[in-house]
Image (tube, coloured by chain):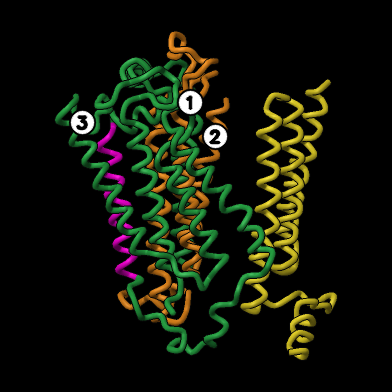
Chain colours: A orange, B green, C yellow
Amino acid sequence: MISNIVLTTGLLLILIGLWGVLTHRNILRVIIGFSLFGTGTHIVIVAIGYVTNGTAPILDRTLPMSEAISRVVDPIPSALVVTAIVIGMAVTAVMLAYTIRLYDSKKTLSIDALMESKW
Amino acid sequence: MIRSLFTILAIVLLGAVFATIAIGYSEQQSLRPLAESYVQLVPRDLGAANVVTGILLPYRAFDTLGEVAVLFMVAASVGLILGAGHRRPEERGEDVQEAARPSSEIVQTGSQILAPLISIFAAYIIMNGHLSAGGGFQGGAVIASCVLLILLTYPEHQINVAFLSIAESLAGALFVLTGIIGLIAAGGFLDNHILPLGQFGAFFSAGAIPILSVLLGVKVGCELSVILDRFRPQP
Amino acid sequence: MMELVGSILILAGAAFHFSAGLGMLRMPDAYTRMQAGTKATTLGNTLLLAGLAFYHPGWSPKLLIIAYFVLMTNPVSSHALARAAYSIGIPMFGGSGIDALRDRDRKLRSET
């Protein structure tokens, strides 16, 4: 039940991000749409690894080694998403650097000024 | 008109595919075999209490090394795009003294309280990578946010970018060196048996994982700080 | 009994968060939107953490530190944003006609 709700939220975020990328004319709003798209994908990946009535895969006093297998959520999707978040932030930084250079040369933030290769 | 029709068509079709996924999904009842073997192996073989860090550092170490390489490439490309000396305010026709308005007293007082707190929190997250939730990447991102706070509060203050670049390169080189030592002295590349495993759950345990976490944290933090520093207007 | 009090506090916090979202949609200009976003969400966060402290009394010191951190960062960041918005010239709604910062700057400049 929980992972169904989280999965639906992640898929909705992907759809909203995609709509934002395709529709807006302002570059900054397109970049925000990309960031939403990435966040939705991370949420979907984490939601797939949920085991019913499971808890976090950290062993301490309340979760000894012997019963760890039966009570723990899948740790592999979490490990993948940890690095994916940092890389998503770095790619957003590159997109914003491109935006600064484009604004310096075209003096506007609208993507209608970038139609040089359109036939 | 045609474009918005295509947009709506794309979103509706993709929504239909997603709805099929979301309706037909049922929760897992027990762990898959690979995850089960990881959860069993990490406490016994590595001595780490946090299974996610145990997967990231010794078992999937090549993924971590590849991500460090991707971050370095991103820092180099941001440095190339926003290279030196082409964004002078006089050329853009703006008023020069509007470019560096000093921050108000509330922000300066707030950052004087917050910057030590954030630094201690970042060090805590890095050092607790193997015991509780945390690790190198997360702590490095928090270090970069502390540097961003100082950059925003004192806009005339020049950060020592040379020191940050040298620290970042040194941390990356030591990371690969530790991996090669693991190749010589223990099981494989970036293996953590080169240091004794210690008692399970103690602060200095799990072999070389704390050292690798610290090196990763320093590298990621300095890298993101250099990226943030490039976005300032060049005087 | 403790769980009932905690649940009521969490519900009140969620109601304040909802009013913050509603205010950000309906307010006329950027400054009033920032005010709606900051004040209501800070109070909503504090009420949420207080309700959680009633659920798990052993977590109270950690929740107190989190509440202190939220109280330190949220108003300071919104103040910095509003100042930056004023200095690049985002227009005000003008319904009240009062602009305290412009009056203070004019007074400072006429004194020096």
Q: Residue at x 62, y 70 (%)?
A: B103
Q: Position of residue B174 (x, y in %)?
A: 25, 44
In the displayed structure, C12 sits above or below C84; it is: above
Q: CA distance from mark 1 to mark 2?
A: 10 Å
How many neighbours does mark 2 have within 10 angstroms: few (below 14), some (14-19), or many (20 or more)? Answer: some
Return the x and y of residue B185 as percentages of the image width and height.
Answer: 17, 27
Secondary structure under tag 3 reads helix
Q: Indicate the position of residue A33 as horizontal and vertical percent values.
A: 49, 57
Mark 1 in CB contact with mark 2 (< 8 angstroms): yes
Residue type highlighted by circle 2: Val
Q: Amino acid at mark 3?
A: Gly
Same chain, marks 3 and 1?
A: no
Element assignment for label 1: loop
Q: Quadrant of residue C24?
A: bottom right
Give the magenta part as a residue range: B60-81
Disc 2 target residue: A6
Nearest the camera: B177 or A63?
B177
Q: Is residue C106 left or right of residue B171?
A: right
Q: Residue furthest left?
A: B184
Any magenta on residue B198? no
Q: Quadrant of the C terminus of chain B?
A: bottom left
Above-or-below relation of B187 to A94: above
Look at the image and tell me whether residue C83 can be seen.
yes
Q: Which residue is mark 1?
A: A50
SS label for mark 2: helix
Residue at image mark 3: B182
- Describe residue C15's horizontal placement relative to residue A83 as left or right: right
**Tag 3–tag 2 contact (CB < 8 Å):** no
User: In the figure, residue B59 lies in which quadrant?
Assistant: top left
- Point out residue A93 in the picture as x, y percentages from the top left corner: 41, 60
